[in-house]
Amino acid sequence: MEGKINATGTVTLTASSATSTLTDALIGNDTVIVFMPKTANAAAEMDSLYVSARTTGSSTLTHANNGQTDRTFDYIAIG
């Protein structure tokens, strides 16, 4: 793994919806998920994006409802 950890991924928020589902086997009830925007529209979304629920293997992301299709984030899931 060359000094890296296997706890990262990429997610794009669902257009025309106020929620998106992030599916990752690393996610559990106590997982901390940190996002890094990859586009200008994703960066603008940072103030309204939050994790509203976590279960084993997935989380619900709540965010602004708009038609933008490029709100893409890299993330790290720890715990």
Image: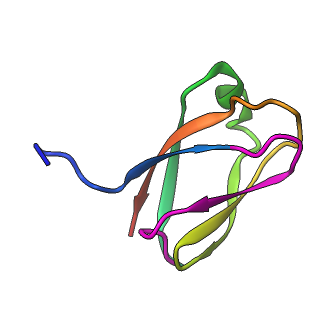
73 relative position to 13: left or right: left
- The image quarter containing residue 38 is top right
Location of residue 47 with respect to 32 vertically, above or below: above
Q: Residue at x 73, y 38 (%)?
A: 47
- Placement of 14 over or under 67, stated as above or below: below
Q: Quadrant of residue 72?
A: top right
61 and 24: which is toward the camera? 24
User: Residue 44 at x, y = what percent?
Assistant: 72, 27
Magenta stretch prevailing secondary structure:
loop
> Residue placed at 38% from the left, 70% from the top?
79
Q: Viewer-proximal residue, 78 or 73?
A: 73
Residue 49, image x, y percentages: 71, 46
Number of numbered callouts drawn: 0
Q: Which residues are magenta?
A: 13-28
66 left or right, relative to 43: right
How was this image coloured? rainbow
Q: Position of residue 55 (x, y in %)?
A: 59, 78
Query: Is residue 31 covered in magenta?
Result: no
Residue 46: x and y in percent read 67, 37
Residue under the point 24% across and 52% down:
5
Say if 42 sits above or below 12 in the image: above
Q: Is residue 26 left or right of residue 58?
A: left
User: Along the line of sight, which residue is nearer the eye, 33 or 60?
Assistant: 60
Judged from this view, the residue extending furthest toward the top is 40
Residue 45 sits in which quadrant?
A: top right
Write the residue at 68% across / 33% down: 71
